[in-house]
Amino acid sequence: LQGEKMKSPVNIALILFVLLLGGLSPTDAFTKPVRTFVIDYSLKALPFAVAWGFILKDLFFKKFSSVDCLRSDTENEYSPTLVAK
């Protein structure tokens, strides 16, 4: 993904979902009943599973072009890059 596709509203919402529920849920940023609910039902893993699903969706269904090799500074070494269509 390049450019504006990385900054889509879905990707921004997913990052916020991961940061809020995954990162801040065990802290004092949430009230005690919310923290207890998240811990009791193991909801801390939910945003990471959703993000993993989005990554898998992109890997399975996005059309990638062939590998383009770019010559690096050192001799006989190439760094392959994938370009999404």
Image (spheres, grey):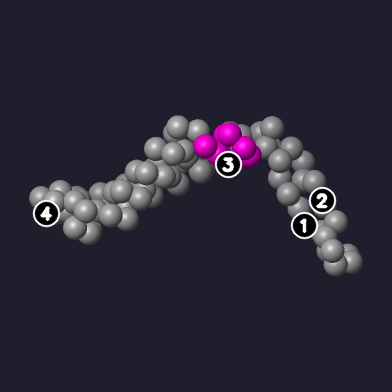
Report how far apart the C-alphas of labels 3 and 1 lie in the structure.
20 Å
Label 2: few (<14), some (14–19) or many (≥20) C-alpha neighbours in 10 Å: few
| Nearer the camera: disc 3 or disc 1 | 1
- Residue bearing mark 2: 69
Residue 29 visible in this rendered orientation of the protein: yes
Across and down, in percent, residue 48 comes to 38, 49
Q: Earlier in the sequence, mark 2 or mark 3?
A: 3
Question: Does the stretch in magenta take in 59?
Answer: no
- Residue bearing mark 4: 32
Task: Provide the residue span drawn in magenta.
Answer: 1-7
Residue 11's place in the image compared with 41, above or below, is above
SS under mark 4: helix
| Mark 2 touches mark 1? (CB < 8 Å) | yes
Report how far apart the C-alphas of labels 3 and 4 lie in the structure.
38 Å
Across and down, in percent, residue 47 comes to 35, 46
Q: Earlier in the sequence, mark 3 or mark 1?
A: 3
